[in-house]
Image (cartoon, grey):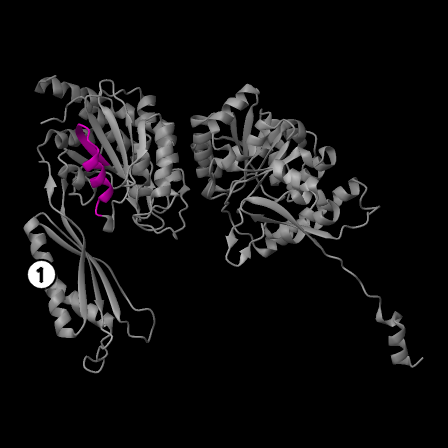
């Protein structure tokens, strides 16, 4: 692993425990005159939205005023999501009511995009609605690097701190789509982005000035496109990532993951095309990159995977001789 | 300062009049205590394993500006909200431990009108009410004369035999005017006496040289069944009120292997200490008799034993509590406690136990509390603290 990558990991990878003093964060935020908005995109999340609004509002607006604005932006839930969210004090918006002149598209990315228009903050923090072990760290862990480090523009979450087992190290897993699709793709085309432990995590915080200049796929590709677009504009230094420990959420079926992968691939190839990489595919990388952790330190494991090929058997002289005797 | 009866009545009346608006205020400020209930409730805290939950309580005590926040040698968290005069203290306590093992998925769900999750009623919401008192009193503009001594006690349930509360009360030397034990459920609960109780564990073992032929197909399960039947033949008197509960019985692990060991947990509660002594003696005798007659080893271990104690129904603390409950729209249900109140009263302090709200599925994974009754439940607690502070509950 290059010194540059390790240096980035050491400098830009945090653990939420580093930011436990929320009061201090509030003071630093106020000193810098930053306003922070929290957005939860929803579609039929009545089971978990109540707890998210209750805890995040109570802890991060009432007890410690880290968040200045808290909005739920909904795609048209047919359950009690809106009622429950409103009941616990969130500002609730229908995505279709925001910027009606541009029309209404259905998807999480639509809600995230319209949040930029609706919300006032200099920093917007996005948190998915399906987290059953919600805790204030899901927000302060993400906004803290933006408060502390001016050169950081975009902070991703990652979870499930790997543990040491008696059988050895457990690799730092993303989701199935991350490990099977995204990490191999990034290893091939954007090796530096493999430093992001969980590129598809639904929780991230970013400065308005970077969110407003990038397009938003409305579906599954939104997280991938953010990384590719901001990496193209600012390089890896604009990113940071925070370990938020455990995240408990719904498990998706393999079919759903297939659909998700299909959407992500569309976004990915779209970016390759836009960035001129589809017509002039560079020499492909042969290094596969994944993560391990030991004693709290993250390191990238690089393995060379060379897919060598044999020619058709019919081109082999020995084969022809045997078959045809010539 | 002595307050004459008429003046006391007028003071109480004035407090009671404020209850409806207090209920509304507590509805508005519910985030304070509901959030703590969820955050604390999601930390597993089996009896003897409450440390992590207690750590969060201590953080909250610090954040809420209490004096002397500490965890004592018994694992209890306590802190003091100083009163305007501070000549005496009012103790408000809630137990931290729950019946759920750490393996239980401690996830709490919040709905519009209810909260569901293991231990939310017993006793996450009770703890949250106590922990949130400094902020609530501040928001409500209530300043007490007495110090408020807040205690979240560990090691209360089951085998712990109130160890945390007893340890705290034995070592914390402060003048205590009265104490209130807070339980999440059931609303209307009014305990002013501690019920005498005996908790025992009986283990039946077949010896290594057990003669299976002499006694037929009698593995530990058959023996336990017969043994339990024999215990049930011990007369349980109606007067004084006495109850025998078999709480847990297990033995064996497969279809076709005769188990060699059986285990029974039971509790005897009685308003008569002599009845408890007598029942204990009889069960002990039965263990010996059964061992000898059946060639098994039956052992009784008494894991908890406590005597009856209480303050009279006519005590001003009880009388005032009843008035407050009535004004809050809560129907009192007198229920002697087998919990922390026992330790409080035996330490010489007048006290009551209150339940905050209605609940269902108690001690199951989907334990649920209802939010609407909770605001009145919180109002009864806060009004009672004010009444104690105003010396309306003194003999």
Q: Residues within 10 Å of mark 1 (few under 14, many from 20)?
A: some
The answer for which chain carries disc 1 is B
- Pick the residue in front: B320 or A108: B320
Residue A324 visible to an observer of this rendering: yes
Q: Position of residue B248 (x, y in %)?
A: 25, 59
A206 is within the stretch colored magenta: no
Q: Quadrant of the C terminus of chain A?
A: bottom right
Residue B238 visible to an observer of this rendering: no
Count the labels in the image: 1
Q: Which residues are magenta?
A: B161-181
Residue drawn at (43%, 34%) of the image: A54
Q: Position of residue A88 (x, y in %)?
A: 43, 32
Work out whether B259 lies above or below B192: below
B163 is within the stretch colored magenta: yes
A252 displayed left or right of A49:
right
Residue drawn at (25%, 44%) of the image: B156
Q: In the picture, residue B330 is in which quadrant?
A: top left
Residue drawn at (17%, 27%) of the image: B175
B338 displayed left or right of B150:
left
A308 displayed left or right of B146:
right
């Amino acid at each position: 692993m290059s010194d540059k990558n390790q240096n980035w990991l050491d400098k830009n990878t945090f653990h939420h425990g580093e930011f436990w003093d929320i009061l201090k964060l509030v003071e630093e935020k106020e000193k810098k005159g930053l306003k922070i908005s929290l957005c939860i995109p929803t579609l039929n999340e009545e089971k978990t939205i109540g707890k998210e609004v209750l805890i995040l509002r109570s802890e991060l607006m009432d007890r410690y005023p880290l968040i200045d604005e808290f909005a739920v932006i909904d795609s048209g839930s047919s359950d009690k999501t809106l009622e429950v969210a409103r009941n616990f004090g969130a500002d609730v918006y229908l995505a279709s009511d925001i910027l009606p002149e541009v029309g209404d598209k259905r998807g999480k990315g639509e809600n995230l995009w319209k949040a930029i228009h609706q919300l006032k903050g200099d920093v917007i923090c996005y948190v998915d609605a399906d987290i059953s072990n919600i805790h204030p760290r899901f927000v302060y862990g993400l906004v803290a690097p933006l408060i502390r480090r001016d050169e950081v523009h975009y902070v991703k979450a990652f979870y499930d701190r790997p543990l040491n087992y008696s059988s050895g190290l457990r690799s730092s897993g993303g989701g199935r789509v991350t490990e099977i699709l995204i990490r191999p793709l990034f290893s091939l085309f954007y090796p530096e982005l493999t430093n992001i432990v969980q590129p598809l995590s639904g929780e991230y915080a970013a400065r308005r000035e970077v969110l407003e200049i990038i397009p938003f796929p409305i579906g599954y590709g939104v997280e991938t496109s953010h990384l590719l677009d901001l990496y193209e504009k600012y390089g890896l230094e604009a990113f940071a990532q925070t370990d938020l420990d455990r995240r408990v959420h719904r498990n998706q079926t393999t079919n759903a993951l297939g659909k998700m992968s299909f959407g992500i691939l569309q976004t990915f190839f779209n970016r390759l095309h836009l960035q001129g990489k589809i017509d002039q595919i560079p020499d492909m990388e042969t290094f596969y990159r994944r993560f391990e952790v030991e004693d709290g330190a993250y390191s990238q494991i690089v393995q060379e995977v060379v897919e060598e090929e044999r020619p058709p058997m019919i081109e082999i002289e020995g084969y022809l001789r045997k078959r045809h005797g010539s | 300062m002595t307050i004459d009866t008429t003046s006391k009545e007028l003071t109480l009346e004035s407090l009671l009049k404020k209850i409806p608006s207090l209920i509304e205020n507590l509805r508005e400020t519910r985030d304070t205590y509901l959030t703590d209930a969820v955050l604390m409730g999601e930390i597993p805290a089996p009896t003897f394993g409450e440390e992590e939950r207690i750590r969060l309580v201590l953080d909250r005590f610090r954040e809420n500006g209490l004096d002397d926040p500490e965890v004592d040698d018994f694992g209890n968290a306590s802190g003091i909200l100083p009163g305007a005069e501070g000549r005496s203290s009012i103790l408000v306590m809630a137990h931290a431990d729950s019946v759920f093992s750490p393996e239980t998925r401690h996830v709490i769900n919040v709905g519009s009108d209810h909260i569901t999750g293991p231990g939310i009623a017993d006793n996450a919401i009770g703890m949250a009410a106590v922990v949130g008192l400094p902020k609530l009193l501040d928001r409500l503009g209530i300043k007490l004369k007495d110090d408020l001594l807040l205690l979240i006690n560990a090691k209360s349930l089951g085998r712990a035999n109130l160890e945390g509360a007893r340890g705290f009360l034995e070592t914390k030397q402060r003048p205590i005017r009265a104490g209130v034990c807070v339980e999440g459920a059931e609303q209307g609960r009014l305990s002013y006496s501690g019920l005498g109780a005996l908790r025992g564990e009986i283990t039946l073992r077949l010896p290594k040289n057990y003669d299976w032929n002499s006694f037929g197909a009698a593995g530990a399960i058959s023996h336990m069944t017969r043994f339990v039947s024999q215990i049930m033949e011990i007369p349980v008197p109606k007067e004084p009120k006495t109850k025998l509960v078999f709480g847990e019985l297990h033995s064996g692990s497969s279809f076709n292997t005769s188990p060699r060991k059986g285990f029974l947990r039971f509790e005897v509660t009685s308003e008569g200490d002599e009845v408890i002594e007598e029942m204990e003696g009889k069960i002990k005798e039965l263990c010996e008799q059964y061992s000898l007659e059946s060639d098994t080893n039956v052992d009784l271990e008494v894991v908890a034993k406590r005597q009856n104690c209480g303050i009279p129904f006519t005590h001003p603390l009880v009388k005032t509590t009843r008035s407050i409950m009535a004004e809050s729209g809560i129907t009192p249900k007198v229920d002697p406690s087998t919990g922390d109140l026992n330790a409080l009263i035996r330490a010489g302090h007048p006290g009551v136990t209150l339940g905050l709200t209605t609940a269902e599925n108690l001690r199951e994974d989907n334990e649920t509390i209802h939010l609407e009754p909770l605001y009145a439940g919180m109002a009864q607690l806060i009004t009672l603290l004010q009444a104690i502070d105003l010396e309306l509950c003194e003999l």
